Amino acid sequence: MQPVAPSSQPGTDELAQYPVPAGDSPAEEAGLGRATRPMGRADQAELAWGLATEAAGLLTRSERAWICVKLGVGDYPQVIEELLSTIAVKEMPLPGELADSARDWVFGFSGTPAEPRLRSLVGMVSPPQYPAV
């Protein structure tokens, strides 16, 4: 992953056109294992920071710095997609809880042009016992 300007990142402009409503994901409240509406910003931030922590050993110092800058300005969808891509390339499965959060995040892109790409990424990093999304 090369730290570059957001406009040259593939797919990130596409993600920006799908705003995520404020509020928390109701998955736990509803007793469901899957999200029933798009993740709120707080849940996206938690997922992005969790992925950044998990992927820290896979990134160079400058890549980690770039991720922290993007997190600091709240560009969670771009960070999540970039980190999922990096983790997928390194063939590193995510811990179950983080994989669940990533699957919930993708739910927010249902029916959009970004959905197939994001589902594929999450499928690549989900533990083997998890069914494909």
Image (tube, rainbow, N blue to C red):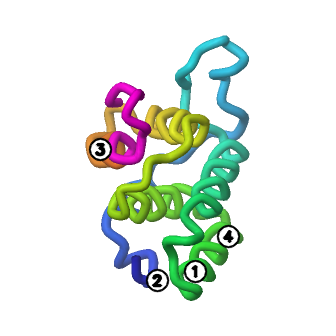
What is the C-alpha distance between the residues marked 4 and 2? 15 Å
What is the C-alpha distance between the residues marked 1 and 3? 24 Å
Pointer 2 or 3: first along the chain: 2
Q: Residue at x 58, y 73 (%)?
A: 67
Q: Which residues are magenta?
A: 122-133
Query: Can I make out residue 128 in this image?
Result: yes
Labels 1 & 2 near each other (Cβ < 8 A): yes
Crowding near the residue tagged with mark 4, few <14, some 14–19, many ≥20 C-alpha atoms within 10 Å:
few
Q: Which residue is mark 3?
A: 120
What is the C-alpha distance between the residues marked 1 and 2? 6 Å
Pointer 1 or 4: first along the chain: 1
Above or below: residue 48 compared with residue 36: below
Counting from the top left corner in percent of width and height, residue 88 is at 36, 56
Pointer 4 or 3: first along the chain: 4
- Residue 39 among those drawn in magenta: no
Q: Circle 2 sits in a helix, a strand or a loop, which is it?
A: loop
Q: Residue at x 56, y 42 (%)?
A: 95
Residue 6 falls left or right of residue 76: left
Q: Which residue is mark 4?
A: 73
Labels 4 & 2 near each other (Cβ < 8 A): no
Pointer 1 or 3: first along the chain: 1
What is the C-alpha distance between the residues marked 1 and 4? 11 Å
Q: Which residue is mark 2?
A: 3
Q: Which residue is mark 1?
A: 66
Q: Residue 124 versus residue 80: which sits nearer the camera?
A: 124
